[in-house]
Image (spheres, helix red, strand yellow):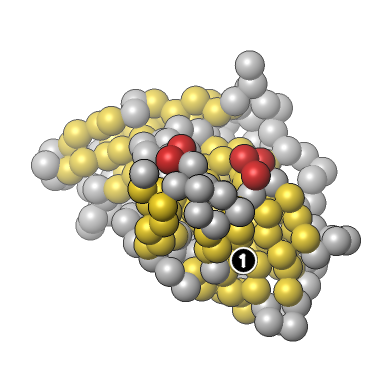
Amino acid sequence: AQSVTQLDSQVPVFEEAPVELRCNYSSSVSVYLFWYVQYPNQGLQLLLKYLSGSTLVKGINGFEAEFNKSQTSFHLRKPSVHISDTAEYFCAVTGLGGGYNKLIFGAGTRLAVHP
Amino acid sequence: DGGITQSPKYLFRKEGQNVTLSCEQNLNHDAMYWYRQDPGQGLRLIYYSQIVNDFQKGDIAEGYSVSREKKESFPLTVTSAQKNPTAFYLCASVAPGTGANVLTFGAGSRLTVL
């Protein structure tokens, strides 16, 4: 079974500052990893995903994440945030293997960008 | 444009009443899912269906029911047996053959029990 821990429930940051949202996972098998973003009263939108290959993954809206297998982490970063990045961010993991593999979500990190 | 349509967006219900949330997709996706979202708890899987006329319980299926009579539709009924139904409900689907569970979500339905 897999699990996901998002280490910060809320992250306040000033506009144009860099930000890192932390995500750690546990799994006994190889995994796929995802970051989703949710704006208020909306569904989730895929930001980026790691399936295989390069451990540095670039996504939409200038976000990127790095898969670190030894530290079982998949932290999300952006070098300069905008007010419009204010949203809730979810890290998710699914295991590889035969049969149906459920997507497990973290509890979410609320990013608040202040002017 | 293709996507997932959930309705209604907001719904109020009295205790003891059943309510059905609609989820329709025109993406030609085989697999569909229902999640429940509560503040600070992330998303929890209620039911999923990988093919028409078949569905499986997720982690919190008690008090809920679903049907999958058409590929495009996956309605969720919140029954009176659900003890704490006030939540934000999200429907999602996965394209066939992706092998990576990349979910496309609807905009959600917010249910409030009065």
Q: Between residues B10 and A99, which one lies in front from this camera angle? A: B10
Residue depicted at x 24% and y 48%: B86
Q: How many marks?
A: 1
On screen, residue A104 versus residue B83, left or right, reads: right
Residue furthest out toward the right: A53
Provide residue A18's location: percent of width, then percent of height.
54, 57
Residue depicted at x 78% and y 72%: A30
Q: Quick one: SS at disc 1?
A: strand
Provide residue A4's location: percent of width, then percent of height.
55, 71
Residue furthest out toward the top: B1
Name the kind of residue labelled 1 in the image.
His
Residue under numbered circle 1 = A75
| Chain of the residue that carries numbered disc 1 in the rendered image | A
Above-or-below relation of B71 to A44? above
Q: Between residues B10 and A54, which one lies in front from this camera angle? A: A54
Residue depicted at x 82% and y 43%: B97
Q: Between residues B100 and B78, which one lies in front from this camera angle? A: B100
In the picture, the quarter occupied by the N terminus of chain B is top right
Above-or-below relation of A69 to A78? below
Provide residue B98's location: percent of width, then percent of height.
79, 45
One can see residue A6 in this view: yes
Res. B27 image quadrant: top right
Above-or-below relation of B39 to B95? below
Res. A23 image quadrant: bottom right
On screen, residue A65 versus residue B85, left or right, reads: right
Residue depicted at x 75% and y 55%: A57
Provide residue A64's location: percent of width, then percent of height.
68, 54
Above-or-below relation of B94 to A50? above
How many C-alpha atoms fall within 10 Å of the one at disc 1: few (<14), some, or many (≥20)? some
One can see residue B101 in this view: no
In the picture, the quarter occupied by the C terminus of chain B is top left
